[in-house]
Image (spheres, rainbow, N blue to C red):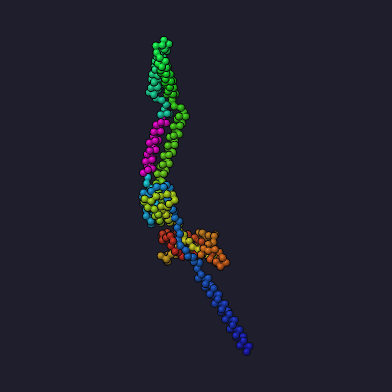
Amino acid sequence: MLNLKEHKKKIIGLAAVVAVAVSAGYYYFSRQNDEFVLYGNVDIRQVSLAFNSSERIEKMLVEEGDRVKKNELLATLESKPLELSIAKSEAAIEKQEAVVQRLKNGSRPEEIEQSAAKMRAAEADYENALLYKNRMAELYKSSAISKQEMDNASARFKAAAADLDNAHETYRLSEIGPRAEDIAEAEAQLKGLRADLLLQKYNLSQTKLLSPIDGVVRSRLQEPGDMASPQKPVYLIAVEDTKWVRAYISEKRLGEIKPGMAAQVIIDSFPDKPINGQVGYISNVAEFTPKTVQTEELRSSLVYEVRVYVEDKDDVLRMGMPATVKLL
């Protein structure tokens, strides 16, 4: 009887050992085959391009899917009004440049001689007016002429005297040349015209939309004839030199992932050709899935964004493409 009890104990003990062994074996097997897998979508940086000025679009030169190079011309605005304005400004500058040069050169000998001749003529008129006035004064004393005729002679004399003063001043100024402040004023006007021209040329350059990067046209948002403005994008250009997979990890497994961890990205198109990458960004702000107000029941739904950067040498990844990420 005792042997039977001991035998039963041995059987029970053996069963317990086997159970523990089986349990341990299952746990080990599960950990070995428990791959750290994330699911997400391919993301690519993109640039939104718009004109800096408001005008109608004249040409759209690239289509969606086209590859473009940095500084490649993508679209143009109507530019005829600006071109005409520039031509007018250039003519005004030429005219003002001539004014400044004339002031700096001073009076020419011919101009001085002309002023001297006018002064001599004014002196002659003054002498004649003086003689006439004196003669009329004698006649007036003898009552040979009326008071009106005497007044006319006096007025003629005064006008001749004023003309002589003006002629003397004109001759004096022609000899000494323009004043420094006159030259400065003319130069300031010229500087203002040149500044206006630079602004107009800059505005003309803004009628051309150039690609700031190498990339691929993702969206064509405007058409010829549309009114462009800085607030209305014309193209979206995808930057292909930096690609990543945007995935999400639960709060429970957040401690298992670190920046710099190696990873493999697998897409459905090439399941047997994994693309190497590494974890480059882990968000420090939790998000809700679904995005609702946090409650005690939804704490398990907190997730954190993870970006796995890849080197897509064969250019097989596309924006929004679903991808599987295996962390190594």
Q: Residue 282 versus residue 103: which sits nearer the camera?
A: 103
Q: Residue 107 versus residue 82: which sits nearer the camera?
A: 82
Q: Where is residue 224 in the image (x, y as percent from the top left)?
A: 36, 51
Is 305 located above or below residue 150 in the figure? below
Residue at position x 49%, y 60% in the image: 307
Question: Number of callouts in the render?
Answer: 0
Residue at position x 62%, y 85% in the image: 6
Is 118 located above or below residue 44 in the figure? above
Is residue 92 part of the magenta span, yes or no? yes
Quick check: can you spot residue 55? yes
Quick check: can you spot residue 261? no
Is residue 259 part of the magenta span, yes or no? no
In the figure, residue 20 lies in which quadrant? Answer: bottom right
Residue at position x 43%, y 39% in the image: 196
Q: Residue 136 versus residue 90: which sits nearer the camera?
A: 136
Is 169 located above or below residue 263 in the figure? above
Q: Where is residue 265 in the image (x, y as percent from the top left)?
A: 46, 63
Q: Residue 203 versus residue 141: which sits nearer the camera?
A: 141
Question: Most extreme residue toward the top, as rendered?
Answer: 142
Is 73 on the left-hand or right-hand side of 39? Answer: left
Find the magenta span and give its range.
80-101
Please state, as top left, top right, bottom left or bottom right, where the N terminus lies in the image.
Answer: bottom right
Question: Most extreme residue toward the right, as rendered?
Answer: 2
Q: Magenta stretch: dominant SS?
A: helix
Q: Where is residue 166 in the image (x, y as percent from the top left)?
A: 43, 22
